[in-house]
Amino acid sequence: MTSSTTASQAELKANKVPLAWRDGCSALLLPLNVCRKQNFYLPWECEHERHAYERCQYEDYVRRMKVLSKRKLENAEE
């Protein structure tokens, strides 16, 4: 179930990404972390990468909430 926003386990391990951050948006996190390190974590740098990652996280959250509400409806009907 890999998508264009999911990095491989080998890439994540090589970049020392913690297990908690290895989710569906992990491929967007890798360039964001590289940019952050190159720019000394300045908050006004890497805005494009950060917004892309945060949008992916938000869309994943919305998708999971839709699945949850659908399951709740199905359980209520039973």
Image: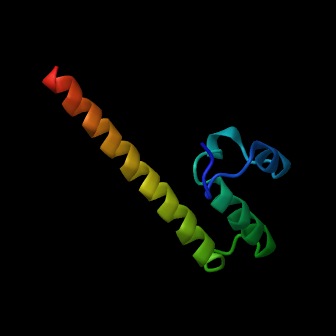
* Whether residue 25 is situated above or below residue 21 in the rendered picture: below
* Whether residue 19 is situated above or below residue 8 in the rendered picture: above
Q: Residue at the location (71% across, 43% down)? A: 18
In this rendering, would 76 be left or right of 35? left
Residue 73: percent from left, percent from top:
20, 32
* Whether residue 44 is situated above or below residue 14 in the rendered picture: below
Residue 11: percent from left, percent from top:
80, 50
Residue 51: percent from left, percent from top:
53, 70
Tell which residue pokes out farthest to the top in this image: 78
Q: Residue at the location (42% across, 49% down)? A: 61
In this rendering, would 67 be left or right of 52? left
Query: The N terminus is located in which quarter?
Result: top right
Query: The C terminus is located in which quarter?
Result: top left
Q: Residue at the location (50% across, 56% down)? A: 57
Q: Nearer the viewer, residue 62 or 50?
A: 62
Residue 72 falls in image quadrant: top left
